[in-house]
Image (cartoon, rainbow, N blue to C red):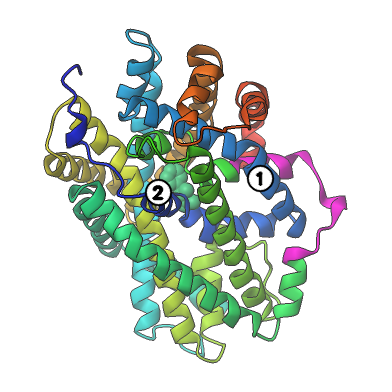
Amino acid sequence: MENNDLSKRGAWGSKVAFVFAAAGSAIGLGNIWRFPMVVGQNGGALFVLVYILAVALIGFSVMLAELVIGRYSQRNPAGAFEFIKPGSLWKLIGYFGILTAVCILSYYAVIAGWSAGYLMKTASGSFKTSLTSELSDKIFTEFSADPLQAILFFLVMIGITTLIVSKGIKGGIERWTKILMPILFILIIYLAVRALMLPGAKEGISFYLKPDFSQLSGKLILFALGQAFFSLSLGMGIMVTYGSYISKSDNLVTSAGWVCFFDSLIAFFAGIIIFPTLFAIPGIAPAAGPGLVFKVLPLIFSKIPGGILFGTLFFSLFSIAALTSTISLLEVPVAYFVDERSWSRKKAAILVGLFIFCLGIPSALSSGGMAFFTKIDFMGKMDFIFLSLFLPIGALLICVFLGYVWGVKNAAQEILSGNPRFKLGPLWSFSVKFLSPIAILIILYFIKTIAE
Ligand code: PHE
């Protein structure tokens, strides 16, 4: 590691480039698919409120912690912890993060592939006006159970991701997120305005934005916290890695703030699109669960005027958002091989991409493609272990490392570079040392209830 040549690693061209790339990582299935789903299942507006608090009080602090570790060490997660505490076991947090990223990517890209498949289906007019709820269910079940299609679309998503990551930080990730993110913003604003003009819009918006405080429960708070970690891509070293390419003259606090802001904004807009759309057809429950996007939305797109265009744009949005997240997931192991094993970026991207493709095949086959993987719900198990369990554990370890091993004072020193008047110190320290770890321990304790 002594001859770690930093100039070969690459760096962001500007602060905006970092914010776009990191927001691209954060904005994904979590915002467009999972956020409306959990809002729907947890009573609507109050959840939105608690979620915003969770992002501001805890998510932001953990994100800043990851960015500081990354920028200070200028390394991938495994190298970063070793650099700060050489010869200790803390570097295992880094390996733990890399493993988590690889495993999450292996099934996340399968769902991203579904989105690409649905984009094709919607665009080619597969969803006719005569579509019924049973038929929509059947189309999704048949589509996700078809081994060929599931694997093919998964391969397409992994292939594009590998290609972009292999082109490096400036020429690959930065270039593409700078193109894709503005498209995503425009699409989401257009779709939100369009959704607000639908017949059921008023009812949908009041479900989404009028809090009913009697709904407050421990479960709601836990869900909101878990969603915040997932949505901000925290706990596995993505932000350590992306932080390691930030210039010493950039302000880390405002960078983290922008990423949290954009991520929450897009989740918020996704709700503005989904709830009025759901209420456009009477009789559809907002608590429809995971099938919400794939089963319910096509039904609605098939009934509303201009639905084919609306639906096609929606699934384009969904696919782009997923792609900017898969890129960040692949970047974590690739940065490791580039930094620590001196592989070329191209070799690392291709080999890791190929490995993840193989690892993801059981997930692609677990929605009916192959009886064995379906029966054990392979994808569900991966999701539970890595997302529900490993992410919060990773975030907890990062807080403990920063708060008690490296020390908030040392970390704050790094923040001063690019932000000489850093004032949030005591608040941030309180969040990293006490509030966030305790909140995560509580999440982990109640994990069974959350998973239900
Ligand atoms: N934050 C991404 C999303 O909202 C998901 C993700 C989680 C990506 C963890 C990377 C790591 O979809």
Question: Which residue carries the number 2 mark?
Answer: 15
Question: Residue 333: x, y in percent?
Answer: 27, 35
Magenta stretch: residue 140 in it?
Answer: no
Q: Residue 332 sits in which quadrant?
A: top left
Q: Is residue 205 above or below residue 57?
A: below
What's the mark number on residue 224?
1
The quadrant of the picture occupied by the N terminus is top left
Task: Identify the residue at horizontal 76%, vertical 76% (top origin).
Answer: 203
* Magenta region, residue range: 208-226
Q: For numbered disc 2, what is the local secondary structure?
A: helix
Q: Rounded to the nearest whole Å, what is the CA distance between mark 1 and mark 2?
A: 29 Å
Q: For numbered disc 1, what is the local secondary structure?
A: helix
Q: Is residue 117 above or below residue 81?
A: below
Residue 95 in view in this figure? no
Main SS of residues in magenta: helix
Residue 425 in view in this figure? yes
Pointer 2 residue Cβ closer than 8 Å to ligand 1: no
Question: Residue 347: x, y in percent?
Answer: 12, 41
Task: Identify the residue at horizontal 47%, vertical 50% (top origin).
Answer: 26
Q: Amino acid at mark 2?
A: Lys
Q: Amino acid at mark 1?
A: Ala
Magenta stretch: residue 220 in it?
Answer: yes
Task: Identify the residue at horizontal 40%, vertical 33% (top origin).
Answer: 240
> Which label's residue is closer to the chain start, 1 or 2?
2
